[in-house]
Structures are given as C-alpha cells and as structure tokens.
Image: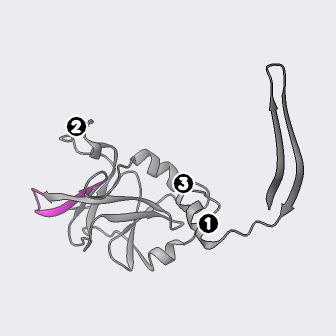
Amino acid sequence: MRLTISSISLTVTTAALSLTAATLSAEPFNPSPRSLTKMSRRGDPTVSMQSLATVCPTVKKVTGREFLWKSQISDHISSQDPRSTGPTFICNKLCPKTWPMNFYYSDGMQAGAVGYYGVYRVTKRPRAYCAVKGARKCFVSRIATNSNLAGRDGKVYLKISDTTCYQVPPIGRTGSVY
C-alpha cells in the first residue's frame, strides 16, 4: 500500500515543533516495471526483477580444473592495492569470452564482477580481479554476508558464458589452475 499525504503544514519555532497532516489517503502500490528495476538496483531485498534462472539458464558445479576462484588474495599484492579486497579468478580449462565477468547471488542479483588483469605467469592463462578493467571494487566479506541474506543460498554464481554459470562459495578456494 502507498500512503499519500496531500497537504502538510510544518511550523518550527524555538519553543515548539508542530506537524499537521491535513489529508491522508491509502491506495494500492502498483509500481511500474521501471520503478521495480530502479528499486532492485538499489538493493531492495523485497524486489527482484529476475531470478537466477533468467541470468543463468544452466548452473554447474566446479569438478576440479575448470578455473580457480579464491577469496584470499596472494601475498605479493599489497593491502593498498584495490584488488586486495576482492576475489581472484584464474582461467584453466574454462575462461569467459568477454570481460568483465559478472557473478550473481542465488536470487539473480548481481554480486560483482572481475575484470581481466593479464595472464598468470605460471600457466599463461588469463586472470581477473575486482577493481580492474570495468569491474568495480568489491569486498569478499560483503559478498559472503550478502550471499547469506534471506532467500539466498550462501553461494555465488560465476557467469562463464551467456547460458552457463558455475556455483562457488564466496569464501575459500575452488578449482585449480593445474
């Protein structure tokens, strides 16, 4: 329901504060699709314009050597580096065709993205982080907390292709580069 106040009077003096609502009316709240989209972008947990199935028609689990996803940053990256607060993604057998690669919560809301940073010198495969090449800075702790909000399953889903996402835990290490 939406509450509409059509007239309001506000008087402020040093001695008293007075607020008078002249007319109140209640009507059903029927937001437009545009309003719903704007609310979902603000992170309103009661409004979701999509589900995981619309973002990721196929969801797979990591079986071993598809890629490496890890929440702990490598020792050689300084805590002052913007990449230091987010996860690391390194390609192995699978790699997205486009960057940045988005990842989502189980309700279909975007959790973040990792951008291409260059190749991992050991395997010569692409690697990616938050806060580089079109990806915003992200925080592993915030991603983990948000993945456990009501209605979410505690995982994130990496969108490797237009139709396929891989389920990974937001904290820890999954997969391998070897």
In this view, the residue in front, 50 or 62, is 50
Q: Which residue is mark 2?
A: 78
Question: What is the magenta range?
Answer: 120-130
**Residue at 22 percent of width and 65 percent of height:** 91
Left or right, 130 with respect to 56, comes to left
| Mark earlier in primary sequence (3, 1) | 1
**Residue at 17 percent of width and 41 percent of height:** 76
Placement of 2 over or under 79, stated as above or below:
below
In this view, the residue in front, 150 or 22, is 22
Q: Position of residue 20 (x, y in %)?
A: 88, 40
| Mark earlier in primary sequence (3, 2) | 2
Q: Position of residue 166 (x, y in %)?
A: 38, 70
Q: CA distance from mark 3 to mark 1?
A: 26 Å
Residue 56 lies in what quarter of the image? bottom left
Amino acid type at mark 1:
Ser
Q: Which residue is mark 3?
A: 148
Secondary element under disc 2, as helix, strand or loop, is loop
Secondary element under disc 3, as helix, strand or loop, is loop
Q: Which mark is residue 160?
A: none
Q: Which residue is mark 1?
A: 35
Residue 9 lies in what quarter of the image? top right
In this view, the residue in front, 17 or 2, is 17
Q: Which circle, 1 or 2, is nearer the viewer?
A: 1
Q: Position of residue 110 (x, y in %)?
A: 46, 62
